[in-house]
Image (cartoon, rainbow, N blue to C red):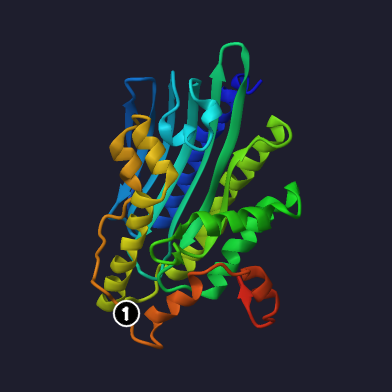
Amino acid sequence: MAHEHLDDVKHYLLDLQDRLCAGLTEADGAARFQEDSWEREEGGGGRSRVMTNGGVFEKGGVNFSHVYGAQLPPSATAARPELAGRSFHAVGVSWVLHPENPHVPTSHGNVRFFIAEKTGEPPVWWFGGGFDLTPFYPVMEDVVHWHRVAKAACDPFGDEVYPRYKAWCDEYFYLKHRDETRGVGGLFFDDLNEGSFAECFAFQRAVGDSFLDAYLPIVKRRKNDAWNDQERDFQLYRRGRYVEFNLVWDRGTLFGLQSGGRTESILMSMPPLARWEYAFEPMPGSAEARLQDFLHPRDWLDEAAGDATLSISGEAL
């Protein structure tokens, strides 16, 4: 059943890539995405779009890929050994934005679809994806807006969906060796095949379609904030955490490399500049120290509901 819908998913993802690039180009106001198409020797390929040195984004990428082959890589079968020996198709769009201004958060997202097949057996399919926000100088108004949009995308699919995938995001984007979350979370889902194909596909579209609504208002609010060298240094230091997560913990990076994907596209997610400083501790009470208050799971919307003074997009809650 699922294989016949592969073209529908692929068509949606290509269109999503176009829409994301158009919205982000407009928000940046200076640079444009450069496209680089590639082919995978074992089967498939993709189109990578990268923006550098823009008016807002120091580096941004929105990549589409469709790879397939006779056997799933070890990263896919380790958790699901029953899939060993199956052929596969993996199609998805992944995006990462690294703004230059330390007051504009970094953000990441992706939506993807997998099919694993074996002669004489029904195909196994699932959807995955989500998006997350990584601020360096977080503003509660932005964090609550981000989660409100995430919840609104989930609400048509059940009251339990947002809490479930919000918690999964907090758990997934967790740097165990640092004992902190990568940022303020968002949504993460994987292995989604509950209910009908149509229902699962609709949820994937809801997540993908909501990203610009979640992110661009934050970019607009913060892109003109003044910043100094100290804040820039702190941003580069915290970008190091982003690199650590992607290289140590991220399953998507591992799958891409093990499946023979294009290395340049897979590592597009890395920031253009980052730094590490031995045993760095921010000054107590500083804006840099305040970030730690945001790097553990919290119910952002419940906290916002209890604060009648908090304004979201100019409207009191």
69 lies above or below 125? above
Q: Residue 118 appears in which quarter of the rendering?
A: top right
Q: Residue 230 in the image: x percent, y percent?
A: 27, 78
Looking at this view, name the residue that lies furthest to the top.
Answer: 120
Q: Position of residue 158 (x, y in %)?
A: 76, 50
Q: Is residue 182 above or below residue 60?
A: below
x, y percent for residue 151: 66, 57
Q: Residue at x 41, y 88 (%)?
A: 285
- Front-most of residues 39 and 57: 39
Amino acid of disc 1: Glu
Residue occupying image coordinates x 54% and y 59%: 170
Quarter of the image with the C terminus in it: bottom right
Q: As rendered, which of 86 and 298 lies closer to the eye?
A: 86
**How far across and down, in percent of the image, does residue 210 sit?**
59, 50
Secondary structure category for the residue under label 1: loop
Quarter of the image where one finds residue 159:
bottom right
In the image, is 199 to the left or to the right of 186? Answer: right
Q: Which residue is mark 1?
A: 281
Comparing 155 with 83, the one in front is: 83
Q: Looking at the image, which residue is at 70% across and 79% down?
A: 306
Q: Quadrant of the N terminus?
A: top right
Location of residue 63 with respect to 23 vertically, above or below: above
Residue 29 seen in the figure: no
